[in-house]
Amino acid sequence: MTSVTPPHSSPTLAHRLAWPTALALSPLLLAQGRYVRSLHPKMPPAPTPWDGAIDGSDPLHVLGVGDSTVAGVGVTDAGLGLVPQFSHALHEWSQRGVSWRSLGESGATSKEVLARFVAAAPGPPADVVLVSLGANDAKDLKPLRSTIRRFERLTEVLHEAHPRARLLFSSLPAFNQFPTLPQPLKAVLYGHSQAIERTLRPLVEALPFAIMSPPPPAYSEGFFAPDGFHPSVSGYRDWARFAFHDALERGVLEHLGPR
C-alpha cells in the first residue's frame, strides 16, 4: 500500500454544515447512537502493559498519544495494537532496537488528552510520536474552533517535550465507511470529522517536524473488530504499516535509518 502527500483541501460547505445539522437532528442522532451501542457492546482497552521493546543496537523510542486506538481497543493483546505494530515496522526497516510506550484512554477527546495525559508524555525522549486523536471530538460533535485550538496546543507541548521527534498525526476515521453506522448519523459524523481534518491538516503540514497521514483507502475486509467501530489485529497492522510507509516515503524517518 502506497500513499502520497494529500492536497490541502479546505472543508466544504457541507462539512461546515455538519455541526449545525447535528444540532437540528440531535434527537434522531442520539436515538441512533443509543441503538448502535445496544447492538454492539463496548469493547475494553487491551490489557496492560502498554509498553514494550524489541532488542537491538542504538535503540529508538516511539511514544503513542491518543484515544481508544492508542489504548488498543479491539484487540486482546496490547502488543498487537497500533503503536507496537508501528514500532515493529520501524525495527524491520531500521534494524535498530525500538521501545514504545502508549498513553491514552478510550473515549478521550483532545481536551481530555491535554488534561490527563500530556503531563505524563515527557518520559524518555522520543524519536517518533504517534498521535491518534480526533475521532471522539468528531463523534461527540465538539465545536471546530476549540478542537483545532486544542490540537495546536497539543502539538506545541509534545514538540517542547520531544524536540528531536517527528510527530505523526493520523487522519480522522472515515466514518462514511463504518458498517455499523446508520444514516443520517454516518453522514453527519463524517462531515464533522472532515471539517476537523481539513482545517487541521495544513496547520500540521506547515510544521517542519510534523505530518498528517493521508485519508485511508477503503477499509479492507476484516479491518474492524466485532464492534464494527475499532480496528481488529489486522486492522491495526494495516493502519500501522500505512502510517509507517507514508512517513518513510515522505522522508521524515530518513535520519532514523540503519547505522
Image (spheres, helix red, strand yellow):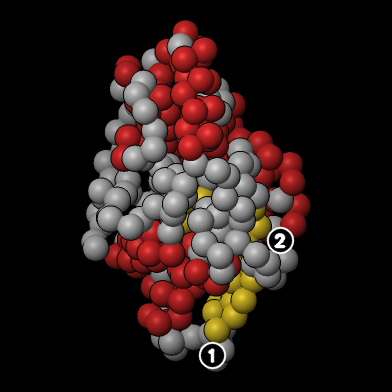
Residue at image position (64%, 71%) is: 51
The x, y position of residue 134, in whole percent, is 51, 40
Determine if residue 122 is in view: yes
- For label 2, count other residues whose C-alpha is less than 10 Å away and answer few (under 14), some (14-19) or many (20+): some
Q: Which mark is residue 56?
A: 1
Q: Residue furthest bottom?
A: 57
In contact (CB < 8 Å): disc 1 and disc 2: no
The residue sitting at 47% across, 8% down in the picture is 24
Mark 2 falls on what kind of element? loop
Which mark is nearer the camera, 1 or 2? 1
Outermost residue toward the front?
39
Residue at the spot of label 2: 122
Residue 146: percent from the left, percent from the top? 59, 26
In terms of secondary structure, where does tag 1 sit? loop
Three-letter code, disc 2: Pro
Image quarter where the N terminus lies is bottom left
Residue positioned 60% across, 61% down in the render: 46
Report whether residue 240 is seen.
no
Residue 208 higher or lower than 252, as above or below: above
In the visual, does 4 lie left or right of 139? left
